[in-house]
Each structure stands twice: as structure tokens, then as C-alpha cells.
Amino acid sequence: MLLLMGVGALAAGGGLGVLLEGCAGPPVTVKLTVDPATLVPGTPTEVPFTLTRSGGDSLPGSTWLVKHNDGSITAFDPRCTHALCQYGWNPDVAKFKCKCHEGTYALDGTVLAGPPPRPLGQFPLRLVGDVIEVDVPGDFATPKASL
């Protein structure tokens, strides 16, 4: 009974996804086709990739890269944390906007408005020479275009 209550509390708090994240299988490393020197600080850049899973199937995906003034780079998961829909950068208002439910995020991924329960997810990122590598979850799915 207590175990069920704990799982229910995790689900209600949005923590069930964190609990189940360990079940996603190993991450897949993807090499991005963008030169880090071309990224403009403070200007998000969507970079497409093809994820090839261990079973051999391929899946289109992308990540939003944000270069910071100190030269560090953040790789955001392209799926809104509310319903796994696509979002895009709106330069007119300098915010990320979800295409399904008008969720709005700041440049750093924090939620500004709408139904998203948490900030944008991030992919672990490494610079190997002048190549950007990101670790994409093994259960990654292409974002929904709309609901």
C-alpha cells in the first residue's frame, strides 16, 4: 500500500518520468553536423540528426543548441515537457513556444507560461575537437507536430 502511495505521489508530482527514465535503455551518441564556432551566443539553433538505434532502425530528430557568452553550449531536447510536442524559437519575443498548447520557455529552458510541468529537457553534450556529440535517450521519439 505504501509503495503504491509513493508511486502515486511521484506521478502526481511529475516525478514518475524521472523514475522510469532509467528504463529507457542506454543513450545513443549522435554526432551533430554543426561547427560550434558558427553558433551565435544567445541565438538558439535547431540542428537535425538521425538517431540510429542498436536494432538498426533510424529515426529523425533534432536538438536546440544554445551557445552562452562563456562559450559553453546547452543541447535542449526538442520535445515540450507537457505533451512531447515540437516547439520552436520565436525571435520576435525571444522565447521558445510549443506548437500544441502554447507552452512558453525562456532561453535557458525555464517555463514562462502554459501547461509544461518542468523546464525543457537537456541532452548531455561533449565537444570532441570541433565536433559536438550529444547523448540521446534510447527511447527518444520524434516530437509530435500537433495533437
Image (cartoon, rainbow, N blue to C red):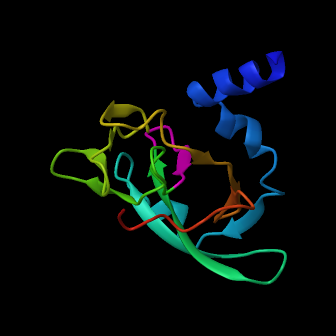
Tell me which corner region of the image, top left, top right, bottom left or bottom right, holds residue 8. Answer: top right
**Picture quadrant of residue 57:** bottom right
Q: Quadrant of the C terminus?
A: bottom left
Tell me: residue 109, above or below residue 141: above
- Residue at x 49% of width, y 64% of height: 143
Image coords of residue 144 (percent x, y): 44, 65
Residue 75 within the segment the image draws in magenta: yes
Q: How many marks?
A: 0
Give the quadrant of residue 49: bottom right
Q: Residue at x 75, y 42 (%)?
A: 20
Image coords of residue 22 (percent x, y) = 81, 44
Image x and y of residue 123, in percent: 63, 50
Extent of the magenta region: 68-77
Q: Main secondary structure of the magenta part?
A: loop
Residue lying furthest top: 2
- Dividing the image into 4 quarters, which one contains the N terminus? top right
| Foreground residue among 67 and 96 | 96
- Residue 72 in the figure: left or right of residue 25: left
Residue at 39% across / 48% down in the picture? Answer: 41
User: From what the image shows, is residue 67 above or below residue 147?
Assistant: above
Farthest residue, direction left:
92
Q: Is residue 66 magenta?
A: no
Q: Position of residue 58 (x, y in %)?
A: 68, 82
Q: Nearer the viewer, residue 48 or 127?
A: 48
Q: Is residue 91 above or below residue 69?
A: below
Q: From the viewer's side, name the closer residue of 16 and 39.
A: 16
- Please tell me which residue lies in front, 99 or 106: 99
